[in-house]
Amino acid sequence: MVPELGHFALILALCVAIVQATVPLAGTVWRVPGWIALARPAASAQMLFLVLAFGALVWSFIANDFSVAYVAQNSNSALPLEYRISAVWGGHEGSLLLWGLILGGWTFAVAMFSRRLPDDMVARVIAVMGLISIGFLLFMLLTSNPFDRLVPPAPDGRDLNPLLQDFGLIVHPPMLYMGYVGFSVAFAFAIAALIEGRLDATWARWSRPWTIVAWVFMTFGIALGSWWAYYELGWGGWWFWDPVENASFMPWLIGTALIHSLAVSEKRNTFKNWTVLLAIFAFSLSLLGTFLVRSGVLTSVHAFASDPARGIFILAFLLLVIGGSLALFAWRAPAVKSTGHFQLVARETAMLSGNVLLVVAMGAVLLGTLYPLILDAFALGKISVGPPYFNAVFVPLMAPLLLILGVGPHMRWKQDDAATLLRRYRFVLLVSVVAGILLPLVAYGTVTPGVGLGVALACWVVGGSVVDLGRRVRTSRGLRGVPRSYWGMTTAHAGLAVVVVGVTLTSAYSTESDVRMAPGESLEMAGYTFHFDSVDQVAGPNYDASFGHFRITAADGSQVARLNPEKRIYRVQTMPMTEAGIDGGLFRDLFIAMGEPLGDGAWAVRIYHKPFIAWLWLGAILMGCGGLLAASDRRYRLAVKSAQAATVGPVATAES
Amino acid sequence: MIHRLFPGLMLALLLGFATMGWAAIESFEFDSPEQEARFKQLSGELRCLVCQNQSIGDSNAELAQDLRREVFEMIKEGQSDAEIVDFLVARYGDFVLYRPPVNYTTALLWAGPFLLIAIGLFFMIRFIRTRVATTDGVGTLSAEEQSRLDVLLQTPAKDEHT
């Protein structure tokens, strides 16, 4: 009964979405206030039905209703409750429903938090989001219904993939989807502005906080995924350039370019077409990412062919969204004039260069991700594109970006003076170069050009911010006079520098040992001694584990940590899983994973010393917090009022 | 080979990422640290053919274990990296390489990023030129006058409609 109610709620959500997408939009064309006013209630109703549908699926999982095919495929009666709930988004159908629910949530938020925006603008934005929702709900109902029944019902479920039975996987997908779907708000604002033919500073100002918040979710989502890969996959890596990772990284890169371009559009009334294009691409890549991961096309192009209905729907939907919005862009964009002028040495130039580098980096990642699929689809041979390719093309693009980042944000709009800048920043430049060479040399005794460059660029970015902050404090009224958005920018950029230090040092100075160890034996590495004490057999709720006991001591004999790596066998899928034991720290992680038993009580053991790896996630947290600071700047709340005054009448496109 | 490959392949396809949680850990005895470094480099750049996007160094599928042993033995026999790679490509094709070779099918892949940056720079420079050129017309004002003018020009945006 409950699954049928969920199914019905999904159908009702589709009906509401159709109303939400058409009536308010028609209302703005024919100027019918009643139709325009329908946008907000429609958004609320759609949210309600999606919550009901999602709740029905959650209920089916909690109640172990194995007559629902999706539940039988992804759950088991022995699965602990928290994983039964997170199993809701453990597969294709459920994650689509989560996507739909989050889209409903963002639409609802737009309806709630835009009371001070002009009604027809909000109506257009909500209508565009309704259009997207129609696509997703149709896809679910026609090809991927999570409520399909299984006749006869399964006696028990096939269990959730053990890899997903983990805290990280409870949090990672919703976080990432909040980011993916959040870009739909920026997309909807851009499309709404194109439909209206009004692209001005107020449009940029309205979409900025939404875009930044979506970007923050995405940043946290990607960082969580990377962290999860590090501790759960069991071989100590944190980024594999896997297509699934690239799928989330590409919209993030474009989203990063977008929040910067939006800033220029708002403050300087220029780059407007570029900003709209970025908003379209950020969301298109989010869609592409969702489908790449969910359609199975990454495993093999032939998986696509094995289920043609899904494949064709996905292609048609992508084509419609991307093609439709680009056609609208091509129609409207020529009329948009940017009025802001600037000289070669100006903050605009720096922002534009950074944007170009981010977009090119995304293009390279896209090329590497899709190239093997395209070759395979045209029967031109099977190739693999992996980390050697991506590192070779990505790293050289990031170095100039960081170089720009040290000084670009601190340049003046319109025009600045190269000689003044050089005078102001030459000390930081000198210190950075010296630090890049000396710091690794002092800490590790060796330095390579790559390490030196990474550390120097990180120092340069932070140093540049410090110099500028000092100038601001002196010229404005102390620290209080510095606006929150400025703190946000500085924090986020410092976060990137922290990530760079983490990536550089952990890549260069990690030490690793794959050894055969028996209980009672010990191994010395990187100044620590790893003692293997014993192994117990432990039974978990749905797995059996070999539970290792390790002790780590420092050179002076004092105990550093006790770690318990596990080797689990999950009963239903009889799948072995490695649970690493990790002693985390600010400057190094110690990592132990147990491999196979080698007979006579001995085990294959992998031990890592990973310096500065925590900085990767610390930096990402800083970047996210920076975004939150910037989005909560009071000017966005004040700006809404004054913006309304400026939009009483439609501003001619040619002037804006 | 086929009878061994097949179950692994089916497993990988059925479970998707399933095989990923199963880290590859074993111990080889190398003659020198250089050999070990070469082994790590190579096993990170060779693809486990039955897994969903894992290197043979990361996977514990049977095939990956076999390939690791094979690479290990070839290194011990004193073969060069190029010889080992050539041998594996002859047997499995380019699919086994995470660093795709440069040939006519991959030309666009390797040239792509350079093309992209060239296109990006071209349009960027063209755009900046138009911006700078339009400024020249009003360049008779000093920087200070210009910024005052800007302030004045920005505020009346509201007045237009009142």
Image: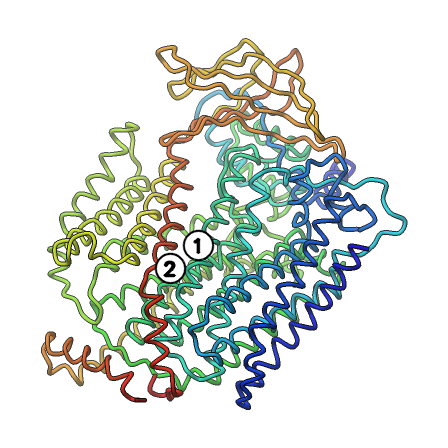
The picture quadrant where one finds residue A651 is bottom left
Disc on the earlier residue, 2 or 1:
1
Q: Is residue B137 above or below residue A272?
A: below
Image color mode = rainbow
Tell which of B8 and A153 is nearer to you: A153
The percent coordinates of residue A182 (x first, y second) are 51, 61
Which residue is tagged 2?
A: A631
Pointer 2 with pointer 1, Cβ within 8 A: yes
SS at circle 2:
helix
Q: How far is disc 2 from disc 1 in space, using C-alphas?
A: 10 Å
Q: Callout 2: 10 Å neighbours few (<14), some, many (20+)?
A: many
Q: Residues within 10 Å of mark 1 (few under 14, many from 20)?
A: many
Where residue A209 sits: x, y (%)?
40, 63
Residue A242, horizontal then vertical, whole percent = 55, 48
Q: Residue at x 29, y 44 (%)?
A: A453
Please report, as a chain letter, where disc 1 is located. Answer: A
Residue type indicated by callout 2:
Ala
Residue A285: in sight, yes or no?
A: yes
Relative to A101, does residue B126 appear above or below in the rendering? below
Left or right, residue A114 beside residue A242: left
- Left or right: A642 as drawn, with respect to B15: left
Instruction: Write down the chain letter for disc 2.
Output: A
- The answer to which of A166 and B134 lies nearer the viewer is A166
**Disc 1 on helix, strand or loop?**
helix
Can you name the residue that lies furthest to the right here?
A152
Instruction: Return the residue at label 1.
Output: A216
Marks 2 and 1 belong to one chain: yes
Q: Amino acid at mark 1?
A: Val
